[in-house]
């Protein structure tokens, strides 16, 4: 094996001195006992059960231990090359001394800029609390080990609380969801996953219905960096797992992938500490699972236990912590199934969803609901759901500790595929899958032993509110699904959906919640997945944003069935309509339709038809906003009362006609005795300047004629009903002039 490793190292051209002896290997196990022996060496293996292979990254010493445990080891050259490339990139980034930043501008780990450093995580917490003080606050829970030795070094351990703080005091039973991240320092992904979830909750409040109702009704407690001293070492590229306690955990060996000083915090918790005879933790200080000299010997452990559980009283019952104590500290009494609250410890890597017990193959008293919930979670991240001891025993671990002492449903999720997982893998796969799993968990936090047995509700939509015969309403639709379990490790019984209900502004279990029945889209509830919908009345609700919850019910348990996890959608109820009045009026001869005052909703439009009287036309329209395209005036948008005035005016016509026989200048015509019109010599027509209105009289007379001419007018008077153009003026020689020219002979023409 040593020759093979040397050849691969030379071929790979590995340059990282820190990690030159690390490999990504596959170890074939002949039987389950060998798998347990091999997995127990690392606590983070990926198991391929079909091939009977476990996969892990380790050093030469780890390979030797696997071979001593009876496993056959081979190197995965491609993954080893990728692993070393990641390490080399990190070393290059560290040596460049260039500041690494996340996309959000926070300090990032060199070579892995998607992951915030401890300082970057703490800055994010500070920013969330500063920008949204009504939703986020920071709790200091005690110093890290390093800080207990020197106040100028190490860290104050901190938690980020996210909930609606304005209503929290009045809601003392609000379920708490406590989540630890990166208690093993080299596990980059957990802290970043939880930090992003906290950001989503805070930034989505008021705009994302799921984030909003979760913040209003769940009290999140994020311990984003549960091992800050160790994490700081891991940020330099060292595969550091434990805290940095060199007093209790002094180790004289060379730190590497298989040995280092310090205490494994996830083997140091007091409940069932050191109960497996060395199989679930180690008493050797250099071992990665060194449990410490005594239970809860480490300040980090003490801080976390005190924060989550509080302190035990004389009867052993804990009080003063984030989560309630509702179970005696034995191994046989079940926690009550109405327990409200959750605990998670997020790790990497193995792609597992784990629940108690970890120190014994015996089932936990709440094993059935723990398993049901675990299989629900594993549907979202596609990980293997199993009891914690399935691969190897663990003692003194967080999930057993808080389930054992408090009765809270407690889970460990092992994320992803590597400790220093590439940013591309994290952002594309590990983060979205596990973000979805934790959101599901939060939706079930009010009754985690009950709700996962019921169906999940998702894809909820609501139409824009509409007014119908019964008043204002919205149409809600959703999918109710009882099949969302991971069935890869045992079979989970699923049930037919029997009903679905909507609830306005109250969760189904809140006082005063009113169930509104939704119907199956195909007309009958007979499947394990159903599309549902129905109308939800909004009458009587105050204007503004409201939330509608949808919850499905299946046939589990008989009787009325078992309700599942709800989800929600926003609906915006419009302001009650303001009415405005448009009053029509006319001036002149004409009509307007409608002719009476009209009451309409503010912002609407209204059409008026204007009809002039005979010989009339529409002169002006005003008093209300709008546009006029004859014969319709469209008033609006109307936002206040107004009077629409339509003024009708008579049509105007010209007065004129023809002229014949005119010789010379001097003819002058008069219109109605006031308007004079000189007619040019030899003119054949005339027209008075200006117009006369419809219905007015006209009278055209001759005021003067040319010398020696006589003129007469035909059709010179009447009433104006249209253009007057038929008046005829006829002129000729004057009669006296003719007699003179004929020698006064009357017989002459």
Image (tube, rainbow, N blue to C red):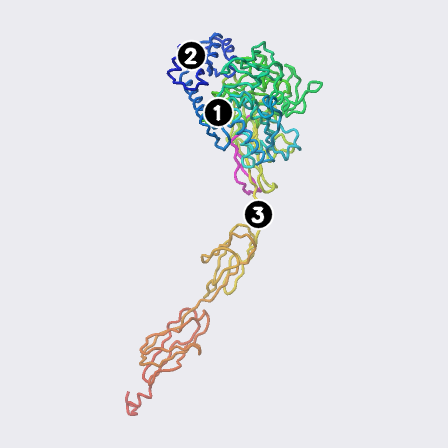
Measure the alpha-carbon separation of dots 3 and 2: 75 Å
Percent of width and height locating residue 389? 55, 14
Q: Secondary structure at mark 1?
A: helix
Upstream in sequence: badge 1 or badge 2: 2
Return the mark for residue 156. Answer: none
Question: Where on the picture, by quarter, is residue 273?
Answer: top right
Residue at which label 1 appears: 430
Q: Tag count in the figure?
A: 3
Residue at which label 3 appears: 577
- Which quarter of the image is occupied by the N terminus? top left
Residue at which label 2 appears: 74
Nearer-the-camera pick, 252 or 56: 252
Do tag 1 and tag 2 residues touch (Cβ < 8 Å)?
no
Upstream in sequence: badge 3 or badge 1: 1
Crowd tier of the residue under label 2, counting other residues whose Cα lies within 10 Å: few below 14, some 14–19, many 20 or above:
some
Nearer-the-camera pick, 473 or 19: 19
Region rendered in magenta: 455-477
Do tag 3 and tag 1 residues touch (Cβ < 8 Å)?
no
């Amino acid at each position: 094996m040593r020759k093979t490793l040397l050849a691969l190292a030379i071929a790979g051209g590995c340059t990282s001195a820190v990690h030159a002896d690390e490999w990504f290997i596959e170890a074939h196990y002949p039987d389950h006992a060998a798998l347990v022996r091999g997995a127990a060496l690392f606590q983070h293996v990926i198991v391929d059960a079909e091939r009977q292979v476990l996969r892990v990254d380790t050093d030469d010493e780890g390979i030797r231990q696997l071979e001593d445990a009876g496993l056959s080891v081979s190197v995965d050259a491609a993954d080893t090359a990728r692993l070393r490339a990641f390490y080399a990139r990190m070393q290059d980034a560290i040596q460049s001394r260039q500041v690494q930043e996340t996309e959000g501008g926070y300090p990032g780990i060199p070579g892995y800029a998607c992951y915030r450093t401890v300082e970057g995580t703490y800055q994010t917490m500070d920013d969330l609390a500063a920008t949204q003080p009504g939703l986020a606050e920071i709790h200091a829970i005690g110093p890290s080990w390093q800080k207990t030795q020197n106040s100028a070094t190490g860290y104050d351990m901190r938690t980020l609380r996210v909930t609606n703080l304005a209503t929290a005091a009045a809601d003392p039973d609000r379920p708490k969801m406590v989540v630890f991240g990166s208690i093993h320092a080299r596990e980059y992904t957990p802290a970043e996953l939880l930090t992003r979830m906290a950001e989503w909750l805070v930034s989505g409040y008021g705009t994302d219905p799921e984030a909003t109702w979760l913040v209003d009704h769940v009290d999140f407690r994020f311990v984003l960096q549960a091992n800050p001293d160790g994490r700081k070492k891991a940020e330099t590229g060292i595969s550091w797992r434990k805290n940095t306690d060199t007093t209790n955990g002094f180790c004289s060996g060379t730190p590497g992938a298989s040995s280092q000083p310090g205490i494994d915090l996830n083997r140091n918790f007091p409940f069932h500490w050191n109960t497996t005879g060395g199989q679930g933790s180690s008493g050797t200080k250099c071992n990665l699972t060194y449990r410490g000299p005594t239970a809860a010997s480490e300040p980090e452990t003490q801080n976390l236990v005190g924060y989550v559980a509080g302190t035990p009283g004389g009867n052993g019952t804990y009080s003063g912590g984030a989560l309630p104590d509702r179970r005696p500290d034995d191994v046989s009494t079940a926690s009550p199934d109405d327990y409200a609250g959750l605990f998670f410890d997020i790790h990497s890597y193995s792609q597992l969803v784990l629940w108690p017990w970890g120190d014994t193959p015996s089932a936990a008293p709440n094993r059935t609901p723990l398993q049901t919930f675990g299989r629900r979670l594993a549907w979202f991240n596609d990980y293997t759901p199993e009891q914690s001891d399935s691969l190897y025993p663990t003692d003194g671990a967080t999930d057993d500790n808080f389930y054992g002492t408090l009765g809270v449903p407690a889970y460990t999720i092992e994320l992803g595929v590597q400790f220093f997982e590439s940013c591309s893998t994290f952002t594309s796969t590990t983060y979205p899958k596990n973000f979805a799993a934790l959101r599901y968990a939060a939706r079930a936090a009010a009754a985690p032993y009950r709700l996962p047995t019921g169906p999940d509700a998702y894809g909820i939509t609501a139409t824009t509110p509409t007014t119908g015969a019964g008043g204002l309403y919205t149409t809600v639709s959703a999918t109710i699904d009882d099949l969302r379990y991971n069935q890869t490790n045992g079979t989970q019984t699923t049930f037919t959906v029997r009903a679905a209900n909507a609830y306005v502004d109250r969760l189904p279990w809140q006082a005063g919640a009113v169930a509104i029945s939704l119907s199956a889209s195909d007309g009958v509830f007979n499947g394990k997945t159903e599309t549902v919908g129905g109308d939800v009345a909004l009458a009587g609700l105050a204007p503004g944003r409201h939330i509608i919850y949808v919850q499905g019910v299946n046939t589990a348990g008989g009787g009325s069935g078992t309700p599942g996890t709800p989800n929600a959608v926003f609906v915006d109820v419009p302001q009650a309509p303001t009415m405005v009045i448009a009053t029509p009026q006319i001036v002149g001869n004409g009509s307007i339709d409608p002719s009476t005052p009209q009451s309409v909703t503010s912002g609407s439009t209204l059409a008026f038809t204007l009809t002039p009287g005979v010989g009339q036309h529409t002169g002006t329209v005003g008093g209300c906003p709008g546009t006029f395209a004859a014969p319709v005036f469209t008033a609006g948008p109307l936002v206040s009362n107004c009077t629409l005035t339509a003024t009708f005016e008579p049509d105007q016509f010209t007065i004129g006609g023809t002229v014949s026989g005119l010789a010379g200048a001097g003819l002058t015509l008069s219109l109605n005795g006031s308007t004079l019109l000189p007619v040019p010599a030899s003119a054949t027509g005339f027209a008075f300047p200006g117009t006369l209105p419809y219905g007015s009289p006209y009278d055209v007379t001759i005021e003067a004629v040319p010398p020696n001419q006589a003129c007469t007018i035909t059709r010179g008077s009447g009433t104006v009903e249209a253009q007057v153009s038929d008046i005829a003026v006829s002129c000729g020689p004057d009669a006296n002039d003719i007699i003179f020219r004929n020698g006064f002979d009357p017989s002459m023409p």
